[in-house]
Structures are given as structure tokens and as C-alpha cells.
Amino acid sequence: MKLAYVDQHAPTVDLIQSFSLEMTAKDIESLTDAAPLIPAGTPISVTYLPGEEMPARVAAAQAVKNLGFVPVPHISARRVLSRDDLQQFLAMLDEHVGIERAFVIAGDPASPMGPYEDALAIIRDGLLPTVGVRKVGISGYPEGHPDIDKPKLAKAMHDKIAALSDQGLEAEIMTQFAFDADAILVWLERIRQEGVTIPVRVGVPGPASVKKLVRFAARCGVGASAKVMLKYGTSITKLLSTAGPEKLIEELADRIDPSVHGDVLLHFYPFGAFVDTAQFIANHYGTAKA
């Protein structure tokens, strides 16, 4: 095993040292409680969920900035009601937060609620650089997407990378959370062979109850409940027990080859439990603030 809590050359430390986190507009208090455990400058994504109003999303991004972290506001293309709506959101972020990074995703609605069909349409609109955005995250699906086939996913990825490059913007991929190291590694190798060289943040779940992991896995289409149970070495009788991503992280650390898989980092989905996730990372990988 290559895990080492103090060896700064250990592969796991390399994966963890520039990790990122994800929050919703409702997680400000939880993030504040966890802040002493999180390294300054950590990128923290602010999701674009239904039922959360624009001011709440902006306030969450502002809290991230005020706590010494880097806000990465999400834009869910199919939930944007109009171009004016998008301009207003970006203008508020620019005025109250000041952002250099954003994450753009198509979003869940089957049909667009406004003029943007997908993330590519948001990128091509050209509004992001007008408010200072210099780096844009796009989605990746190592275990596939429940509604989109692999060739379409691949084309969308290449189109978005090309559109960002045309505007002089940096790009990175942030994946849906996954459980299967084999699937992650095969996907990474494939996209590198296709010429994708940008950094990839692999999404992993923070420590959570197995029941919660199963629920989120079903929502995200990242595998059946049986796969979750298998990967986390538990059973249906232990749904209330807590599982962490140690096994997945260890396997990725042992098997990732930068010459094959490229620049890979981790993105944690805490499911609102920031203190637990930050404590888990600090305890296992020594990333707490000095």
C-alpha cells in the first residue's frame, strides 16, 4: 500500500494535496464550521440546484471567498430562464464576490427552461470572460450517463474544450462521483488517448451513511446499489453504517500513472457534512491548516 500520512511523495498525497469540495447554498454554516480544517485556497464549488434562489447562490459564493477559499459557482444551462437571467447572475457574482472560475453543466431538466440547451450553449454565448472568469470546469462521467451514450458524451467534451480554447479560457474536467476505480482508470486512459490533456478532478463521496450513498448513486446513475455495497465492503443490513472513500482513493493512488492517466486530482462531495469530510481528509492525508 502506498498510503502515507507524512510522506509528501506518496501518490495519495499527490491526489489529495489540491483537492476541491462541493456545497449547496444551504451549507454555509457547515462550511464555516469546517473552515479551520480546510487549506486556504481550496476550490469550493457552489451548486445550482432547483429551489435555491439567485441571491442565496451568490451569498454562498461570497461566504466561500470570505473564508479564504476559491468559489467555483455552477451554472446549470437548462435551468437558466433567459440570457438576461444569466447576465444578472454573473453580474451579481462579479459585484459581490469576484470570480475567476465557474463550472458549467447541462442540468437535470428534460427540456430547457430557457434558451440554453446544454453547457456548450452557455460557453459559446461568451458571457463568462466578460466578468473575469478565466477557468471553466466541465462535466465528466467515468461510469457513463443514464441518458446519454458514450459517443455523444465524448463529442460534447471535445466541443466544450475547443470552445473554451477559442475564447482563451482554461478548462478542467470535474466528474460525477464514482465508486469503481476500474471504470475511472479506463475512462481516464481513453480520454487521454483521444487527446484530452486538461486536468481531471475525479469526484469521490465524503464519508456518509451507506444508505445516503446508495440514494445519491441511484440519482446520479453511477451504478446499482449492489455495486456500492460491493465497493464499500458492507451489506444491506448495515445501511446506517458510515462508509468512507479510503478504498477507492488507495486503489486510484496505487494504479494511476501520470504518463497514461494525466493530471488527476480529487473532488469531494460532502453531502453537507463538511466537518466530517474535512476531518476525514485531515486525519488520513495530513491536509489540515497549520
Image (tube, rainbow, N blue to C red):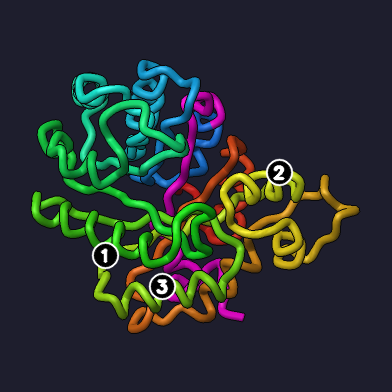
Name which of mark 1 and mark 3 comes first in the sequence. 3
Query: Residue 14: x percent and y percent?
Result: 42, 68
Write down the region rendered in magenta.
Answer: 1-30
Residue 101, located in which quarter of the rendered image? top left
**To which quarter of the image does residue 40 belong?**
top left
Instruction: Tell me the kind of residue under disc 2.
Output: Lys
Is residue 68 in view from this perspective?
no
Q: Which residue is mark 3?
A: 188
Name the residue that disc number 2 marks: 212
Secondary structure of the residue carrying numbered label 2: helix
Residue 14 visible in this rendered orientation of the protein:
yes
Q: What amino acid does circle 3 point to?
A: Leu
Q: Residues within 10 Å of mark 2 (few under 14, many from 20)?
A: some
Asked whether the residues under the numbered discs 3 and 2 touch, taking CB atoms below 8 Å apart as contact, a structural biologist would say no
- Residue at mark 1 to residue at mark 3: CA–CA distance: 11 Å
Whether residues under marks 1 and 2 lie with C-beta atoms below 8 angstroms apart, the answer is: no
The residue carrying mark 1 is: 198
Where disc 1 sits, the SS reads loop
Neighbours of disc 1 within 10 Å: few (<14), some (14-19), many (20+): some
Residue 151 sits above or below residue 27 on the image: below
Amino acid at circle 1: Ile
Decide which of tag 3 and tag 2 comes sooner along the chain: 3
Give left or right: position of 237 versus 226: right
Residue 275 % position (x, y): 60, 39
**Label 3 element class:** helix
Mark 3, other Cα within 10 Å: few <14 / some 14–19 / many ≥20? many
Q: Quadrant of the N terminus?
A: bottom right
